[in-house]
Amino acid sequence: MSKTVRLGIAGLGTVGVGVVKIIRREAAMLRARTGQEITISAVSARTRDKDRGVSLKGYDWEDDPVALATREDVDVFVELMGGSDGPAKAATEAALKAGKDVVTANKAMLAVHGQDLAVLAESHGQVIRYEAAVAGGIPVVKSLVEGLAGNQITRVMGVMNGTCNYILTRMESAGLPYETVFEEANQLGYLEADPELDVGGIDAGHKLAILAASAFGTQVNFGAMELEGIGRLTIEDIRAAADMGYRIKLLGVAQMTGRGLEQRMSPCLVPAASPLGQLEGGTNMVVLEGDAVEQIVLRGPGAGEGPTASAVMADICDIARGVRLPVFGQPAETLAPATGAKSTSPAAYYLRMMLDDKPGALAKVATVLGEAGISIYRMRQYDHSGDGAPVLIVTHRTSRDALDRALGAMDRTGVVDGSPVAIRIEEV
């Protein structure tokens, strides 16, 4: 005789509604695959009477998500409200203390409070599952924690914000400036209420911090991440990158070094022919590298009702099957503090600058680079008008410290107009 797994769902936005639809539509399939009856006892959201396009008949309503999380008839609390603190965190903590397992799509909460929540969950014998918090419908957390459990992970890398990838690929395909495509994305509803979460790299940084904890056995340390958004990129950068065989992506990279954990989320040039270079629109891609498996590439939709609800349901099904794993793949008490380390891994860099159109200007820039130990791989100067000459330089591999010294010295040459743009070229 099958047991019933009873859910309490807090948050009835796009993802929450998607979960309700799957449970109502696929009850027989879920029962066959888990051996359990998966039902919804009660729900909670900010607005009770809103038309959500799905029937909530038969579910109790709780105005307070904490009350929902502690109900006797809830076995699994499904947190889909969002936000690093406030009701989401309070209800999650209440659920764990009340002996409930938790499934969440809340990347911000885990990136900021992941270690404390993991300790709380494991001290009460509960689990937190969060596949939907990272890369939408792509099963990257399961791949990392379960499928690659026998690997020493060497690098985690990926495009983890579909909105930024949409903006960058749209700029290239339509030849439109950043400001135009930003507004277009906003009108289409792609941007968060605070757009900086997307275009500033914060949303994607949350996801990378969560993956890094599981990949390298460390406590989540979002605060140590190097963050740079896409706001400084121009259509000229997009075109120049394409002209040289590259595409620009907001790329997250995490790797463990002798100095500590490197985590960076920033625009990078990647080869146009690489899997990351061929990624279009709002799609996400995560690359996992391990000592035994070498490299695997996971690609799929990073957001949306169906894909994200699919990830939530995968976690619910695992709990129904009796799968119980530590939050970040190993007991929270064994996770090492993540000492943040600034990236010093050598790389080639793309530089864009505007030089005064006068004799000797380019020679001064080349001298500055040479004095910093940086050699030029290739250089291009495009047509110009007025007093400024746009110059693009691709360096040979160098350290970021050496590059920063050179950029600082360029300001003192008197021939560089404004601040040069420097973008790392990532080997993928």
Image (cartoon, rainbow, N blue to C red):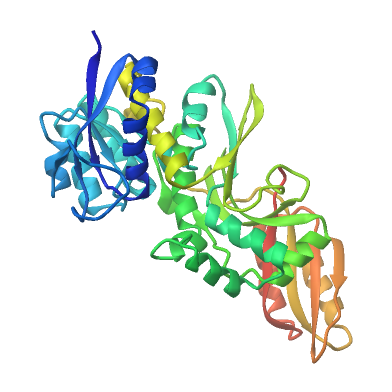
Question: In the image, 210: left or right of 281?
Answer: left
Residue located 46% across and 62% down the image: 191
Total numbered labels: 0
The image quadrant that residue 405 belongs to is bottom right
Name the spot of residue 282 as percent of width and height, x first: 57, 52
Position of the C terminus, as image quadrant, is top right
Q: Is residue 367 above or below residue 394?
A: below
Residue furthest out toward the bottom: 386
Q: Is residue 76 above or below residue 132?
A: above
The image quadrant that residue 129 belongs to is top left
Residue located 45% across and 31% down the image: 217
Name the spot of residue 179 as percent of width and height, x first: 58, 74
Question: In the image, 400: left or right of 328?
Answer: right
Name the spot of residue 410 as percent of width and height, x first: 72, 76
Q: Is residue 397 above or below residue 180?
A: above
Residue furthest out toward the top: 1
The image quadrant that residue 94 belongs to is top left
Can residue 325 be seen? no
Question: In the image, 72: left or right of 338?
Answer: left
Position of the N terminus, as image quadrant, is top left
Q: In this orientation, which residue lies closer to the viewer: 56 or 149?
A: 56
Q: In this orientation, which residue lies closer to the viewer: 369 or 248?
A: 248
Name the spot of residue 341 as percent of width and height, x first: 52, 48
Residue located 59% across and 44% down the image: 158
